[in-house]
Image: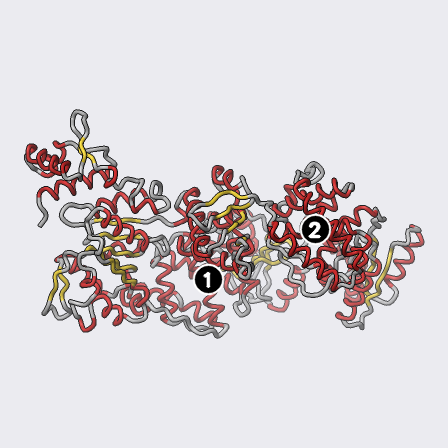
Amino acid sequence: MKTTKELVYEFVQKEIYTKNEEGIETKTVADVLDMQRSNVSALLNDLVKDGLLIKTNTRPVLYKLPHENNNTEENSAFTKLVGHDGSLKNAIQLAKAAVLYPRKSLNVLLASKNGCGTTSFAYLMFQFAVENRVFDEEAPFVKINCRHYAKSITMLSDELFGKDDDLETNSFARARGGVLFIDNVDMLDAKQQSRILELLDTGKLFSEDKSRSADFSDVVLLLACSPQGVSLFNRKIPVTIELPELKDRPMSERLELINHLFTIEAMNSDCFIEVTTEAIKALLLTEFAFNVKELLLEIKAACANAYVRVVNDKEEDIHVCLNDFKGDIKKGLLNVKDLEPIVLSILNISDVMIYDKTAQSYKPGDGDKYHEDDLYAEIRKQYDELTDRGINSSSIENVINTHIQFLFKKYRYFHDFNNNANDLDQLSKIVDHRIIRLVRKFLEGCKKDLGKEFKSNVFYGLCLHVNSLMTLNSSHQRVKNEQIVNIIQKYPQEYAASTQFADLLKHQLNLELPIEEVIIVSMFLIESDENENEGNPVLLYILHGNGTASSLRDVTNALTQCNNAYSYDLKLEIETQQAMQEIKTLIEKIDKGQGVIVIYDMGSIKTMIETIAEEIDVKIRYMNIPITLVGIDIARKCSMESDIDYVYHMANLEINKMSRNEEKHSDIVVTLCHTGEGGALQLKRYINQYSKLGMKVIPLAISERDKLLKEVIELQRTYRIHTFVGTYDPKLLGIPFISIGKIFENSREDLDRILMFEPVKSNAIDYSEVYKYFEEQFKYVSVPKLKTILPDVLDEFGVLYPMSEDQRVGLFMHLACLIERLLDGNAVVENSEKSKIIGVFKDEYNSTRKLLRRLEKSFNIIIDDNEIATIIMIIKKI
């Protein structure tokens, strides 16, 4: 048992640590501990004599902890934590109070999501206790992570409670006089949890048969669980500490954390690490599902990727750029506007941050730093490349000498390029701003050193070209050897400048250009100087028939005398692939450098042109003049009708519809009823009155399926039929159907959500984009059928279970993907929590089973208990 003197000392420590007190009066100690003031004064003075406290000369006298023994923010174990004076301040205050609680430290429950740093926090609590003599320096810290034993409950019991229930060799026995940290304690089964709760109540651990027990009251328990598992233990544990997610911490703390993690990697690798600020911004703006742990792993992986590039050169620094991270992190830059202004200003100071390998420090670096040690290696590499290309010695010497001059003059052209002629805001939407900056400096330097003026198209073209190289994966040679030799011999200065530019791209963007690409960069500089005729666009007729396009070409050239019209007669018997190849060859031949405008009549010509445009570097624009299609339609009507005015009128209607682009292929709703037009017309009026979607509504009262099909096909020539609404589902052409009952059973305010196939209760997501995604990705699910059935099923779930919008969308996506997976014949994913979930949520299991029957019947699938357990977990947010 502790002495009164020890109790007084512990109380003073607790008050100072947890309340940031400058000192404490005798009266306060006496009142709280219910002791005589004179006795307390004597004990406090004894502690001063022992050197454990100091007292002030003020009135009243205050007792304080001496500087060397005062674990203030300057030397406490918790100062190692990023955010100790910010988002983690309250958590640390609670931890200190629990550790310094009089007589015995309190057991603590740590609540956080995966990866928030519970293990680090628990160990720092232990270190703080050792610092403050709560535990001896040799005291044990034992950790058990229940997640590691998720597949074997027996192994977990053996580790935690002892093999064969041995109370003297288990984890609690190993932690005597110290701390037992049980991570993911909410993963224990009911029996294991019961034994832990009993220990928290009594301080004793009983054997399973209750015949034996052992006292573990001297063990401090730190239990960690997810926020959902808090209710299992917080009624038995007096202190619950919640650790925030990474996304909820201030941006400044996240930046400090990133810097800290890169510093650790620098020390581990024994290399200086340079990280582009672009990469740091992306890390700041990325949401990590597993919080700090995932951030740490991503930084380790990126540093490892970068280290591979210099593994053979121990003197080389590690250069980490955005390309060393996975795609999800690169997407974070799309939200760069969300960066706090203070953080953004810090990161804009420099292009890179440098992390010291010898000490835990970092600083902004010179992004334009050139590694002089590489100078000779670069020269030797270039010499070998030029020799392999068959270039004579005198030409090589000329190139190398010019290149060296550029190396030593490089800093002279690092000035701003004139932005006035360039719309950089528009360009920056598609080109990495670092590329824009490098190209700007490169052209400014070339302007001075080569004495050339560069047009804005050179700037834009070079930016777009370098941007494409960041993602280009081309293995074939793009420039012939003869052209390489010719460029280097005729334009050595332009080539040397381009080589210097390639060096910058290598060191700052981790983009290494082969000699072919260096030549292409040189050609940007050369073509600007040669001022060749830029040419004009040309016209190409592509029409069906023999001689149709050729005749139009001849007439056009004869009347204009421009001779810039060309033709291709698309014969009816020719194969599509052959025709496309011939058109492609013709376009490449007639292009004068400014592109080709194609006039075509009908059929697959548009698809062929679009495909060709993706394959070749020629600007192609196309116009549909459907003269042949109009002629075919009029001829067909003439064969069926005897009234010339009727044919003429219908033909004009068709032509007018084609010319009105705003109506062409616009979405419509078709209302249906079996007999008479009244029902369909009334439904149309109701939709027109209360819908805000602006879709045209066309009523049809046709009961015969063949006639209805004919009318629907006719409508599809002009419109896209969004849905049928009516008293029956015609099941035509895969067009989805909405019953009239659903329209009138819900309120008018829900009409548009019903028409857009959204769950009625939903209001925060554009489901049209979700369905568009399904149409692109799904191979087996009928999306029209999905639109008809899934919203109703989701609404039925919403009636039984209150769900957030995120849960609703998550369940919607899960069910749709589940149907696709089952139709694809993929194996069922085992849910390790199945038995536990179904056992605990029996009512939810039965109702979910019932709600899913409609999906099973409609799509001819079977949804087993593993999937039902997963759905319950979504609904209950488990």
For the residue pair 37 and 778, the one nearer the viewer reads as 37
Residue 447 position in % (x across, y down): 74, 41
Q: Is 38 situated left or right of 18 in this image? A: left
Measured from the top left, where is residue 851 in percent x and y?
38, 65
Q: Is residue 622 visible?
A: no
Looking at the rendered structure, the secondary structure element under dot 1 is helix
Give the label on residue 790, or none: 1
Q: Which mark is residue 661?
A: 2
Residue 519: percent from left, percent from top = 74, 55
Q: Is residue 864 above or below residue 784?
A: below
Query: Residue 56 occupies which quadrant of the picture?
Result: top left
* Camera-nearest residue between 121 and 491: 491
User: Which of marks 1 and 2 precedes in the sequence?
Assistant: 2
User: How many angstroms separate mark 2 from mark 1 (CA)?
Assistant: 34 Å
Q: Residue at x 30, y 47 (%)?
A: 77
Residue in the foreground of this view, choosing between 317 and 634: 317
Residue 854 % position (x, y) = 42, 67
Position of residue 533 relative to residue 598, above or below, is above
In the image: residue 199, left or right of residue 87: left
The answer to whether 729 is drawn above or below residue 427 in the figure is below
